[in-house]
């Protein structure tokens, strides 16, 4: 398995060097290109894993990304400065999460119980009783949850966040449209609650007959009590889903019931993918004409395809310009457009975009003449936005039930949001 | 005075960083000591040698501060080797710590002890290890389990004598899933470094335990258990079914490596279950595989390489998922290239329109390498799917009309392959001939000339075209020269009246003014064939013989290698598409074995070829063996320092045969990987040129390895054949020719 973990800055200086096996020597840092299996770059550092065996490549890359995540959760962000300031802690972490090159528990919440930034908290871990409790939990079947959690008010927040990906050809046909969704939950629940979670998943709806108990937060007609939902909205075919480790995969596989004991606080309950019947929130019609070699004319129309009650925020349309653009002029019917020479883009921002509205941008880019004219590659036009109370896949939360020994009642909130993933339109 | 000076020279310097650190390490204030330890570790990371501080750091080992303890331990692990004697001083603390009431401290002690690779320390490890293996805290037990693997690595005999292996095997039955996972990890590691021990034997009982732990342990533990399950050969069909059933839910895990490991298990065990069941599992496997494609680029690449392997075995698992593999504008190039390959693999007559539109889009981008591959992909699709060939050819013509230099060149090469399969597209030849002036790469020129020669009777100005090439014959690359030669001869045989002068000019140029033996040889062969007047048809039947059509131009791995790689899913080996022996040797010390093999080879070379070695030695001014070692160090390893750890020697004794095996294949070029070496290519072209007078393309690029030898063989044949001109000989030869071609 892994022989060592190294972190370099952009100059190639070694910031962290942790060898786990004898075949990993300090000289390695100088020639890390030999037998290097990976270097995901993050911020301004390189994370490098070294091995001399036929290691599990997927595991190694996953692990390095987990390391980045862990760094973020500890230091806010993992960059050169954070590494330099916290190198002791990083060594401590590496020692804990990798043993002899084999990854151990990498769950940030668990690790934070006994590896902490402040010296004060680590005193807890020094007392034998506490630490035996901590270690029990860190290795237990429910390593993600403490046993003694108490809340006065039991609440659970569910956020359904969808990234909609679109690739549209120049002729306006949809080449590819799919949704990557995630369901993030913030659980503030007492004790060891057992949760059951229901979606309007087609496979599930065919078999189950439970009614929902989810309450919706915020306005909009997209969510409501289970009965209404089932009547109103159709069902969704989830292509694939992946779950947080707390979800009992066996039960999902057998009867598609999502059942779990949640960790405390925020976590990503599941991710899913849907490819059928994707509702595209925006339609874009770009017309781009290259006039001779000195001018490009743009006319971009964008129409919102969702209910007039909703509105999208932070809509940004990036319209690529040729590399040799000298100046541009833009006129818009809404929002502001600006040329960003460093990205070769005209950036059109619309802070608030109501449903069913349609806006147009007309622009003209003047090009400088170049000695060797290279064809313009015409990169696709891209869009970013976020839209509340709308799911592109049509997914709805039907219920979230909480069962606990003490039988308390709990309040649940659901929120939906659709964002642009890679929303690209060729022209 | 003088005495003092001398004494001063030997004393420890009173200034500088080391001095300051030392002062801090022995300070009376705890916080100052801790700060100095931190600074020492920092210096260590920067690559400074702070081993001189060893005794002073060691003084700080006995502390209640866990953080400080960890730092001291970290320092110890790094420098224990440089002060093996002083390590003894730390033993006491370790032993005490391993009985500490705090499980974190106990685990830390046993974990660190295993990492201090000093013989003396190992002697003291026995007791603490035995105790911690039976510790009440699962956290300590799981750490101790890994420590057994560390001990085995250091001193296998001690590990066996003390029965740690048996203890570890018992621990698979531990109630705690993490302990189970780590025990399996440790056992698997021991198993792989010493197969003869059979450390990891799976019984019905352990299988049940592992399947139970699978659903409860951490994601990394799951990967370990799954990898072990994948290697396990189930006792009967029922067991295989059971394993598949229990593993399949892991497809839904969020961690890509767990998903891949689960896919591996199911894929390997699927062979034994019924075809119906296998089909449902294949169906179940597709969506998770597709999901992997949206992960981080590196993970995505691993997934794509593995999907490539799976598709070669099961070509239709992802039939409907073509769109997922469309390249995004911002994908890194390595991901884009791999996606292209996969798209071609899953192309069928239903999705081909979509694919072609997409490929055409790519071919109009600006990244030259990507564009070329896209054009190539269009050709592969044309040859793969007959019904789509016309659309593909039209797409290629559209691209040629864009007049982008490199697109045109690649398209011509691709079209040549298409002609090999579908000779009927001669209508496009005029279009191709128009761009003759734009071609500057030998490959593209050769392709076009081949086309002209092949269709010489239908191209009215073939003589003029070839004439212009013959004029500049000696400026061409040899690859192109060979094609010119063949094409002119074909033209002459088809339309003798037009090419009489041309063929003489080209033969003259190729024999008298050319210094490439391949070109000369071929020219002489043609010359003799043409000057043979007794049987005109003999020449024709050789030069204008029918060529076996190309079946596919998609690169595929040989079945045996594929089977082997499927066993290695998700490992580096599956990413490189090479068996592990090619980049690591057997077990953990593979790299060392490779290195030793290389040294031996060098010495062997020196022995067999003393002259060359002596010459080389004279140049470098060293003895042969020393030079050999130098080379080896440069080429192979990063940390070769002669003194291999003791356990290496042990291992070497136990399995020297294996290591020899493991070492050698490294130097043999893989038959399947990468593009064929240029020389191989030449040979092959040569060979085909003589017999199929095509030299067009290799049906599969995996021919590189054999082509050299085959070339030699065929040269021998041609020599034989030139003397006898009877037609049976020709038939016979043609047969061999086809046989040989079908080999590729």
Image (spheres, rainbow, N blue to C red):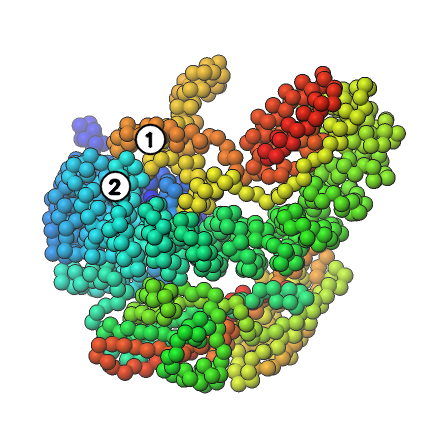
Q: In which quarter of the image is residue A211?
A: bottom left
| Residue at (37% x, 41% y) in the render | A53
Alpha carbon distance from label 1 to label 2: 31 Å
Q: Of A355 and B622, which appears nearest the observer?
A: A355
Residue B735, position as x, y percentages in the image: 66, 29
Q: Which chain carries label 1?
A: B
Tally of numbered discs: 2
Answer with left or right where residue A361 lies relative to residue B293. right
Answer with left or right where residue B44 lies relative to residue B361. left
Q: Is residue B311 visible?
A: yes
Disc 1, SS: loop
Q: In this view, does A104 lie above or below A417?
A: above
Which callout, 1 or 2, points to the residue nearer the camera? 2
Give the numbered dot on residue B550: none
Quadrant assignment for the N terminus of chain B: top left
Q: In this view, does A213 lie above or below B593?
A: below
Q: Of B122 and B712, which appears nearest the observer?
A: B712
Residue B521, position as x, y percentages in the image: 70, 22
Contact between labelled residues 2 and 1, with CB atoms less than 8 Å apart: no
Give the numbered dot on residue B641: 1
| Residue at (26% x, 64% y) in the render | A142
Pointer 2 residue: B199
Q: Is residue A33 visible?
A: no
Q: In which quarter of the image is residue A184?
A: bottom left
Q: Which of marks 1 and 2 is nearer the N terminus?
A: 2
Q: Which chain carries label 2?
A: B
| Residue at (20% x, 29% y) in the render | B6
- Crowding near pointer 2: few (<14 within 10 Å), some, many (20+)? many
Disc 2, SS: loop
């Amino acid at each position: 398995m892994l022989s060592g973990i190294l972190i370099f800055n952009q100059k190639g200086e070694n910031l962290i060097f942790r060898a786990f096996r004898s075949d990993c020597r300090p000289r390695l840092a100088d020639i890390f290109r030999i037998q290097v299996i990976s270097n995901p770059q993050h911020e301004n550092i390189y994370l490098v894993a070294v091995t001399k065996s036929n290691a599990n490549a997927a595991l190694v890359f996953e692990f390095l990304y987990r390391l980045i995540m862990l760094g973020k959760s500890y230091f806010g962000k993992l960059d050169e400065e954070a590494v330099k300031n916290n190198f002791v802690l990083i060594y401590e972490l590496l020692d804990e999460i990798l043993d002899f090159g084999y990854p151990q528990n990498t769950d940030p919440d668990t690790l934070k119980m006994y590896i902490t930034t402040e010296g004060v908290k680590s005193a807890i871990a020094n007392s034998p009783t506490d630490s035996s409790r901590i270690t029990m939990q860190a290795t237990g079947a429910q390593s993600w949850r403490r046993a003694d959690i108490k809340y006065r008010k039991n609440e659970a927040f569910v956020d359904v966040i969808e990234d909609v990906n679109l690739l549209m050809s120049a002729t306006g046909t949809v080449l590819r449209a799919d949704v990557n969704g995630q369901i993030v939950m913030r659980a503030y629940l007492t004790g060891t609650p057992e949760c059951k979670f229901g979606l309007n998943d087609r496979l599930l709806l065919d078999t189950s007959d439970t009614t929902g108990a989810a309450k919706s937060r915020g306005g909009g007609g997209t969510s409501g009590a289970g009965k209404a939902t089932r009547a109103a909205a159709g069902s969704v075919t989830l292509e694939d889903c992946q779950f947080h480790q707390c979800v009992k995969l066996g039960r999902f596989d057998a009867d598609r019931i999502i059942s779990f004991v949640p960790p405390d606080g925020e976590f990503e309950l599941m991710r899913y993918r849907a490819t059928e019947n994707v509702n595209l929130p925006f339609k874009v019609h770009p017309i781009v004409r290259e006039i001779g070699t000195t001018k490009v004319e743009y006319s971009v129309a964008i129409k919102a395809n969702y209910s007039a009650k909703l509105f999208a925020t932070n809509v940004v349309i990036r319209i690529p310009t040729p590399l040799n653009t000298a100046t541009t002029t833009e006129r818009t019917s809404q929002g502001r457009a600006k040329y960003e020479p460093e990205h070769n883009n005209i950036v059109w921002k619309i802070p608030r975009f109501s449903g069913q509205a349609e806006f147009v941008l007309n622009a003209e880019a003047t090009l400088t003449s170049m000695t060797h004219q290279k064809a313009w590659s015409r990169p696709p036009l891209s869009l970013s936005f976020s839209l509340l109370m709308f799911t592109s896949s049509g997914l709805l939360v039907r219920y979230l039930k909480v069962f606990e020994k003490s039988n308390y009642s709990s309040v649940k909130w659901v929120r939906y949001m659709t964002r642009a993933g890679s929303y690209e339109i060729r022209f | 005075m003088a005495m003092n000076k001398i004494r001063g020279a030997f004393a420890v310097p009173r200034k500088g960083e080391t001095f300051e650190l030392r002062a801090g390490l022995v300070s009376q204030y705890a916080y100052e000591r801790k700060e100095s330890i931190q600074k020492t570790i920092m210096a260590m990371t920067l690559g400074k040698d702070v081993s001189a501080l060893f005794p002073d750091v060691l003084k700080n080992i006995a502390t209640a501060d866990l953080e400080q303890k960890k730092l001291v331990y970290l320092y110890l692990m790094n420098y224990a080797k440089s002060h093996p004697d002083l390590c003894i001083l730390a033993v006491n603390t370790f032993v005490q710590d391993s009985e500490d009431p705090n499980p974190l401290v106990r685990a830390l002690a046993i974990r660190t002890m295993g990492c201090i690779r000093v013989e003396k320390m190992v002697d003291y490890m026995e007791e603490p290890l035995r105790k911690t293996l039976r510790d009440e805290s699962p956290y300590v037990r799981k750490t101790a389990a890994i420590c057994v693997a560390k001990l085995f690595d250091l001193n296998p005999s001690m590990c066996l004598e003390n029965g740690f292996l048996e203890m570890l095997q018992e621990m698979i039955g531990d109630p705690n899933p993490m302990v189970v996972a780590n025990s399996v990890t440790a056992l698997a590691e021991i198993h792989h470094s010493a197969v003869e021990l059979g450390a990891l034997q799976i019984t019905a009982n352990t299988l049940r335990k592992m399947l139970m732990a699978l659903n409860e342990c951490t994601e990394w533990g799951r990967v370990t258990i799954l990898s072990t399950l994948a290697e396990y050969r189930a006792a009967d069909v029922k067991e295989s079914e059971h394993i598949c059933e229990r593993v399949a839910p892991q497809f839904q895990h969020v961690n890509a490596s767990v998903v891949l490991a689960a896919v591996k298990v199911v894929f390997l065990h699927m062979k034994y279950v019924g075809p119906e069941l296998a089909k449902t599992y294949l169906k179940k496997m597709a969506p998770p595989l597709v999901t992997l494609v949206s992960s981080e680029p590196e993970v995505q690449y691993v997934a794509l390489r593995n999907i490539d392997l799976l598709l070669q075995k099961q070509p239709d698992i992802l039939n409907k998922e073509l769109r997922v593999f469309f390249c995004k504008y911002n994908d890194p190039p390595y991901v884009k290239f791999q996606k292209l390959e996969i798209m071609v693999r899953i192309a069928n007559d239903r999705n081909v329109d979509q694919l072609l539109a997409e490929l055409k889009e790519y071919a109009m981008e600006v990244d030259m390498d990507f564009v070329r591959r896209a054009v190539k992909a269009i050709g592969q699709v044309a040859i793969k799917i007959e019904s789509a060939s016309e659309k593909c050819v039209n797409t290629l013509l559209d691209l040629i009309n864009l007049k982008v230099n490199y697109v045109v060149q690649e398209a011509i090469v691709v079209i040549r392959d298409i002609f090999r399969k579908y000779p009927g597209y001669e209508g496009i030849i005029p279009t191709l001939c128009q761009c003759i002036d734009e071609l500057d790469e030998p490959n593209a020129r050769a392709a076009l000339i081949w086309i002209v020669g092949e269709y010489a009777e239908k191209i009215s100005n073939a003589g003029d075209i070839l004439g212009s090439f013959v004029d500049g014959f000696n400026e061409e690359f040899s690859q192109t020269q060979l094609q010119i030669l063949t094409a002119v001869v074909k033209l002459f045989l088809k339309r003798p009246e037009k090419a009489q002068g041309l063929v003489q000019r080209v033969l003259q140029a190729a024999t008298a003014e050319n210094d490439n033996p391949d070109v000369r040889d071929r020219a002489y062969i043609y010359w003799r064939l043409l000057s043979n007047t007794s049987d005109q048809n003999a020449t024709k039947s050789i030069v204008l013989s029918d060529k076996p059509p190309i079946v596919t131009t998609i690169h595929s791995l040989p079945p045996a290698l594929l089977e082997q790689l499927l066993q290695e899913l998700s490992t580096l080996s599956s990413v490189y598409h090479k068996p592990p022996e090619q980049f690591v040797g057997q077990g953990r010390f593979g790299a060392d074995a490779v290195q030793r093999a290389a040294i031996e080879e060098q010495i062997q070379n020196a022995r067999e070829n003393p002259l060359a070695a002596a010459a080389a030695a004279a140049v470098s001014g060293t003895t042969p063996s020393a030079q050999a070692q130098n080379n080896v160090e440069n080429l192979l390893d990063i940390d070769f320092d002669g003194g291999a750890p003791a356990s290496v020697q042990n291992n070497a004794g136990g399995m020297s045969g294996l290591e020899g095996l493991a070492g050698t294949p490294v130097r043999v070029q893989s038959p399947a990987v990468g593009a064929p070496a240029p020389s191989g290519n030449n040979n092959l072209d040569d060979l085909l040129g003589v017999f199929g007078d095509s030299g067009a393309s290799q049906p599969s690029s995996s021919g590189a390895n054999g082509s050299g030898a085959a070339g030699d063989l065929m040269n021998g044949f041609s020599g034989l054949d030139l003397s006898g001109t009877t037609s049976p000989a020709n038939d016979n030869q043609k047969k061999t020719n086809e046989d040989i071609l079908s080999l590729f």
